[in-house]
Amino acid sequence: MAERIVVACVQQRMHLPLTIDDYRDDLRRFMRVAATKQARLVIFPELGGVMVAPPILRDFHSQLLKRYDRGRRRNAPLWDRAVGGLAGSMVSMVGADFRRGLASLLDVEANEIWRTYVDVFGALAREFAMTVVAPSAYLPDPLDGVIRNLAVVFDSNGQMVGRQAKVVLHPADTDLSQPGATWNVIATEVGQIGLILGSDVLYPEVGRLLAYQGADLFIVQAACTDQALYQKIRAGTLARMQDNQLFAAVSFLVGNNLLSRAQRTPFAGKSALFAPQELTPRSNGVLVEMGNLHSEGVLAALWDFASLRELWETSETPVRRQLPLQQAGQLLAQLYARLQTLPKVANIQQLADSETSDTVQRKRELAAPQTLDDLAVIATVTQQWPPALDTPAPHSYDPIDEDDNDFLIVSTDDLDDEVTDKQVTAIDNKTPPVLVDTEKLTHAAMPPVASSNGEVFGGDKSGEDETDEMDVVADEDKGA
């Protein structure tokens, strides 16, 4: 591994080439610029490799799409513009769609796409004698043949030295590919590469895992269709770089979005080369960055690995030298093991469907005819309610307005001798007296009773001084 290398980062526009030679010529533009900068490592964006598929698509709809795309290019000749305009009017009429064509091609010619991809980028790396991180594409994984969003690394001899699949899929990926399983460092002649695709970079564990496997640099490939996602990918790359004090690069796809199912927002982003903040001129982690969200371009910068290793030893925040691995490892292992034991959340749509089914069933049951024998017996009445007292209270009181909510507390002195002095009668303007055993009364059990002066007796009076129930009764008797 060299102590100092120049790295080139490509920001590439999405288009539909007519032939493979057209695509090769387009790629050589970027490689020649990188060669003038004496770059040893060239990085392409996510999903840029999908452009090997259009030349293989030879059906009528795909031909219209390719002619239409060619006529829309900035420097297209007049003839191509005229043909492209005519093809564009027919595209909407026949319902041509590149995504559907690509999905069909992956079903029947996935191996041809793979062979073309390897041939194009292997030859490119060999021609310019550079290590090339090829753009990702929907490709059959050589490990098991499953279609994944896959990026491949080629050395300066054009040999494939490693590959990485996207693990956390974007919604636009889900019907075209399957997620990858893990992240592994790729050993190359320019260093140990930790390759991260798209939103995988938003997870701190991914960067830490690759750093502990010996990564010298992070390479992030992305294709963003909105400003918010671009900003998150950029911030995530900066964070993973600074978390682990490594060099990092992020390459974005730009241009017309021909891969979305419905949304046609163009791809956008600013590709950049990053370094730990201590090694950048403005201490912001940025060595060089594109100035435009939608233009093609090539960035180049020098990565000094000798200075990076010195930083690991001298930094006032030695995250690589003094990370408490023993404590952090144990805590993280326990946390992740606990998360695995949590119940899985059911699919929301399934829950909604189940709830709808249950509701319909309940409505059907309620609408079904019922007989008296089907009705449940709740209670039987054996006497008039409320029961009359054997000994009516001799106390007489004035009628109370039916709208009045006051209560009258009757003292035990007013009760007949046959009624024990441990009982108290509480009545209102509608209910006959009811005997209550005061030994069993507490402030928590006794229902709140409001008097005419606004005081409340009984119930839970949190925050107030407790008052003995019998004192309250006596006071009310005097007031009566």
Image: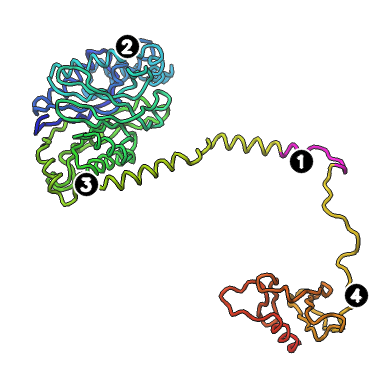
Q: Which residues are magenta?
A: 362-373
Q: Is residue 356 left or right of residue 37?
A: right
Amino acid type at mark 1:
Leu
**Given the current orientation, which residue lies at the most extreme bottom position?**
478
The residue tagged 4 is: 390
The image shows residue 90, relative to residue 420, as above or below, that is above
Amino acid type at mark 4:
Asp
- Is disc 3 placed on a helix, strand or loop? loop
Amino acid type at mark 2:
Glu
Q: Is residue 277 left or right of residue 387?
A: left
Based on the displayed image, in which of its 4 quarters is residue 242 positioned? top left
- In the picture, the quarter occupied by the C terminus is bottom right
- In the picture, the quarter occupied by the N terminus is top left
First in sequence: mark 2 vs mark 3: 2
| Front position among marks 1 and 4 | 4
Q: Residue at x 12, y 20 (%)?
A: 129
- Expressed as whole percent of the image width and height from the top left, the position of residue 131 reads 16, 24
First in sequence: mark 2 vs mark 1: 2
The residue tagged 2 is: 112
| Front position among marks 2 and 3 | 3
Amino acid type at mark 3:
Val
